[in-house]
Image: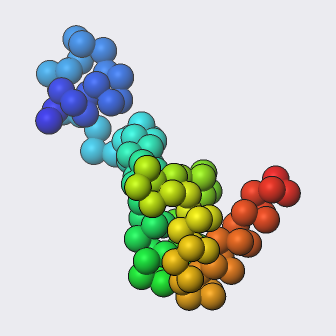
Amino acid sequence: KRLILHHIVGTPVEKQSEEPPKEHPRYEELNHFMRGGFAGPAIMKAINEADAGGIQSILEEFPEALYFESKRAGSIWDVAHRRKTDPKVTAVIEAAFRKAKKA
């Protein structure tokens, strides 16, 4: 574990016998990157559960997740419209795409 944390931080080899820092910006960067990989599937799950607030929360932190596409289910846009989900969910997805188009 210690060597992995040193590797993440970029600690020189000669200092890797010391304890790695408890907190570091690189830990946060890696955590954000890893969580981003699950953001698209989490939106799909939120669509299926009609969780409009969850979708908004995910998109605030990971706006790029809007373009996630499942090989099995299709794009977020398609899933939100094809499944005839809660109108609030569809509205959140449509608003997110409009916002992305303006940016």
| Up/down of 101 relative to 14, above or below | below
Pick whichever, 17 or 53, lies toward us: 53
Q: Taking 93 as reference, is 74 left or right?
A: left
Quarter residue 101 falls in? bottom right
Q: Taking 96 as reference, is 23 left or right?
A: left
Q: Is residue 35 in view? A: yes
Q: Position of residue 47 (x, y in %)?
A: 49, 75
Q: Residue at x 72, y 63 (%)?
A: 97
| Up/down of 23 relative to 76, above or below | above
Q: Position of residue 89 (x, y in %)?
A: 59, 81
Pick whichever, 54 or 98, lies toward us: 98
Pick whichever, 35 or 16, lies toward us: 35
Q: How is the image coloured?
A: rainbow
The residue lying furthest to the top in this view is 14
The residue lying furthest to the right in this view is 102
Q: Residue at x 46, y 67 (%)?
A: 44
Quarter residue 33 falls in? top left
Image quadrant in which the N terminus is located:
top left
Q: How many marks?
A: 0
Q: Position of residue 53 (x, y in %)?
A: 54, 81
Quarter residue 11 falls in? top left
Q: Taking 64 as reference, is 47 left or right?
A: left
| Up/down of 72 relative to 19, above or below | below
Q: Residue at x 62, y 87 (%)?
A: 88
| Up/down of 49 relative to 4, above or below | below
Pick whichever, 6 or 62, lies toward us: 62
Q: Position of residue 30 (x, y in %)?
A: 40, 40
Q: Is residue 28 in view? A: no
Q: Residue at x 42, y 64 (%)?
A: 42
